[in-house]
């Protein structure tokens, strides 16, 4: 079902106050940017409900606000390749070959898929119950909206490799050095909390998982993985740990 394209509804402020916990720690400038980026997403993207489901303002605003948080220091233009946001009521059941829970294994059973990001001009698919819970109750290290939209940022340079576009050579070198060290440890089965072990699946999943930690548990990530926190902060051009502390 297609949702008519319009910007933020009149009730948007009430919705973010009720449903998006991070709103409470943003300053006025960040709130203004978040609202503008959310409005752009609602206006310029196709918002679609999966078969048998219907969208309402709570759903679109809550998802748009979380996607907008990632690009507060960047530009909404980073999302120009997102053709549509397709919302499912809950996890999609998918049969196929997936990376298993243990690195290097695969599973072909029916697995719940919380979200997907298709490359090129592809859509983002999201499970609403997951997106809603993560928005309201941050701190678990999981956020499907951050995860899937991070994949879209990674795809901006046409290579899905966990390295987003970095303009300066020295930033790229440092990014690769820092991320490779943590990624290799995860691959070796060494736990690096608060990063989810799923980050060991591929470099692309590593970036998505690191993004989830950076925005959802920033203070913990900064304490446990200060170098990773720093390269993420420099890429995203925002400091969620400082924000959470003030
Ligand atoms: Zn992923």
Image (cartoon, rainbow, N blue to C red):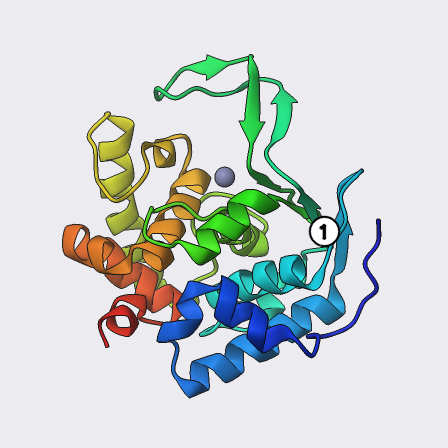
Point 44% across, 86% down: residue: 29
Q: Is residue 12 above or below residue 194?
A: below
Estimate how packed mark 1 is, as few (under 14), some (14 to 19) or many (20 or more) residues with alpha carbons within 10 Å: some
Q: Is residue 240 above or below residue 212?
A: below
Point 40% across, 54% down: residue: 137
Q: Work out which quarter of the rendered image holds the C terminus and state it.
A: bottom left
Q: Residue furthest left?
A: 223
Q: Position of residue 233 (x, y in %)?
A: 32, 66
Regarding residue 71, the answer to whether it shows in the image is: no
Point 61% across, 44% down: residue: 126
Q: Quadrant of residue 118?
A: top right
- Is the CB atom of the residue marked by disc 1 within 8 angstroms of ligand 1's nearest atom? no
Point 48% across, 64% down: residue: 20
Instruction: Identify the residue position indicated by label 1 in the image.
Output: 121
Q: Is residue 64 above or below residue 6?
A: above
Q: Is residue 171 above or below residue 161?
A: below
Q: Position of residue 98 (x, y in %)?
A: 52, 21
């Amino acid at each position: 079902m297609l949702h008519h394209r319009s910007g933020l509804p009149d009730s948007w402020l009430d919705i973010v106050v009720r449903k998006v916990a991070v709103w409470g720690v943003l300053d006025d400038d960040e709130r203004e940017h978040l609202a503008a980026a959310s409005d752009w997403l609602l206006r310029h993207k196709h918002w679609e409900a999966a078969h048998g489901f219907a969208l309402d303002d709570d759903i679109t605003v809550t998802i748009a606000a979380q996607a907008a948080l990632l690009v507060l220091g960047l530009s909404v233009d980073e999302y120009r390749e997102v053709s549509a946001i397709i919302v499912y009521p809950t996890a999609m059941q998918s049969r196929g070959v997936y990376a298993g829970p243990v690195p290097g294994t695969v599973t072909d059973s029916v697995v719940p898929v919380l979200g997907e990001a298709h490359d090129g001009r592809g859509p983002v698919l999201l499970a609403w119950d997951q997106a809603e819970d993560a928005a309201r109750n941050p701190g678990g290290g999981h956020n499907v909206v951050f995860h899937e939209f991070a994949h879209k940022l990674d795809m901006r340079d046409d290579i899905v490799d966990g390295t987003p576009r970095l303009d300066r050579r020295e930033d790229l070198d440092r990014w690769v050095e820092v991320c490779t060290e943590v990624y290799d440890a995860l691959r070796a089965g060494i736990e690096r909390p608060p990063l989810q072990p799923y980050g060991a699946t591929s470099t692309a999943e590593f970036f998505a998982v690191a993004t989830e930690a950076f925005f959802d548990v920033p203070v913990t990530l900064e304490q446990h993985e200060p170098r990773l926190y720093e390269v993420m902060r420099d890429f995203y051009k925002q400091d969620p740990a400082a924000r959470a502390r003030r």
